[in-house]
Image (spheres, grey):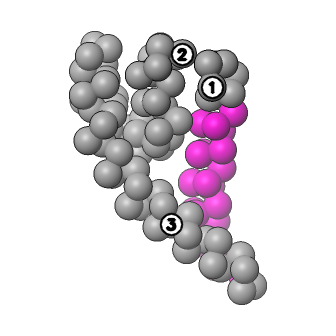
Amino acid sequence: MKNPKFWSLMKAGSVMGWLFLFYGLFFHVQGGMMNIIWWVVLLGWGIGHPIELASSIPIAKDKGISPETAFIKTMIFGFTWWLPLKMGVTED
């Protein structure tokens, strides 16, 4: 977990999650299991990322990062952005 490449891969996974969500919005994911997965990702991203703002904004403030940047990056990447920042593995 102290490897910046690990966190870059995790961030790419987060972006893939968003792409999957948008795909499902526009093309309606078909199939029972894929539909369930889509709903799980939607709830995880839609509920989880806003909740994470309570953690990410103070961490960003301590690192000299604006709340606006923290908001955007947390909504896109979630914990894969702010946790390595907190651990000192990455810088913004």
Q: How crowded is mark 1: few (under 14 residues within 10 Å), some or many (20 or more)?
A: few
Q: Quadrant of the N terminus?
A: top right
Q: Which residue has dot 1 on it?
A: 1
Q: Name the residue under label 3.
A: 42
Give the residue at mark 2: 89
Q: Earlier in the sequence, mark 1 or mark 3?
A: 1
**Magenta stretch, residue numbers:** 9-30
Q: Which of marks 3 and 2 is nearer the N terminus?
A: 3
Residue positioned 32% across, 51% down in the render? 51
Res 9 → quadrant? top right
- Closer to us: mark 3 or mark 2? 2
Magenta span dominant secondary structure: helix
Marked residue nearer the N-terminal end (1 or 2)? 1
Q: How far apart are marks 1 and 3 (CA)?
A: 26 Å
Q: Position of residue 22 (x, y in %)?
A: 57, 62
Please name the amino acid that badge 2 sits on: Val
Disc 3: CA contacts within 10 A as few (<14), some (14-19) or many (>=20): some
- Residue drawn at the location 35% of the way across and 45% of the way down: 52
Point out the image quarter for the C terminus: top left
Please state the horizontal and vertical placement of residue 58, each as a whole percent of the image: 24, 28
Q: Quadrant of residue 46?
A: bottom left
Q: Which amino acid does label 3 sit on?
A: Leu
Q: Does the magenta stretch include residue 7?
A: no
- Indicate the quadrant where residue 68 lies: top left
Q: Distance between the residues labelled 3 and 2?
A: 28 Å
The structure residue drawn at horizontal position 71% and vertical position 76%, both measured from the top left corner, is 34
Q: Find out whether the residues at labels 1 and 2 contact each other: C-beta distance under 8 Å.
A: yes
